[in-house]
Amino acid sequence: MSQRQTPPLPPSLLAMGPIVYIGTAIWFVVAVVLTFVDRGSIYMWTAWSGGGLGIIGALIMVWQRQAGKRGSKAAQRID
């Protein structure tokens, strides 16, 4: 009985950009809707916080990608 090698994941499943960008956009859409529907609720503030953290995450991804292109040894790269 030989062990089979696990095939590598396709690049579309490794791409974090679309997940972060779409998730951040969803947080902002929910935040805007809740701002008009349920102003001042904890859900509205949670949605705004989720959008803000999504922007921070996207900026970190861009920063890491640029560092990887520069060849920085501290950059995190997915090969």
Image: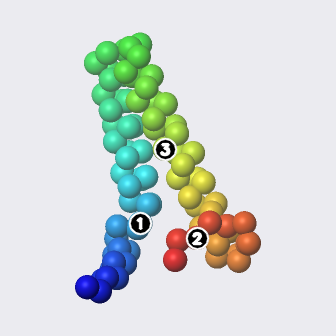
Cα–Cα gap, marks 3 and 1: 16 Å
Residue 39 picture location, percent across and down: 37, 15
**In which quadrant will I find the N terminus?**
bottom left
Label 3 packing within 10 angstroms: few (<14), some (14-19), many (20+):
many
Q: Nearer the viewer, mark 3 or mark 1?
A: 1
Q: Give the residue at the far left of this rendering.
A: 1
Q: Which image quadrant is residue 63 in?
A: bottom right
Q: Is residue 53 left or right of residue 28?
A: right
Which residue type does callout 1 highlight?
A: Ala
Cα–Cα gap, marks 2 and 3: 20 Å
Residue with the mark numbered 2: 77
Point 35% across, 74% down: residue: 9
Residue with the mark numbered 3: 54
Coloring scheme of the render? rainbow
Residue with the mark numbered 1: 15
Residue 66 appears in the picture as rendered: no
Looking at the picture, does residue 28 appear above or below residue 41? Answer: below
Residue 25 picture location, percent across and down: 38, 45
Point 33% across, 78% down: residue: 6
Residue 77 picture location, percent across and down: 58, 70
Residue 56 picture location, percent across and down: 57, 45
Looking at the picture, does residue 46 appear above or below residue 15? Answer: above
Which residue type does callout 3 highlight?
A: Gly
- Give whichever of 55, 68 is nearer the camera: 68
**Element carrying mark 3:** helix
Label 2 packing within 10 angstroms: few (<14), some (14-19), many (20+):
few
Q: Are marks 2 and 1 in contact (CB under 8 Å)?
A: no
Q: Are marks 2 and 3 in contact (CB under 8 Å)?
A: no
Which residue type does callout 2 highlight?
A: Arg
Residue 65 appears in the picture as rendered: yes
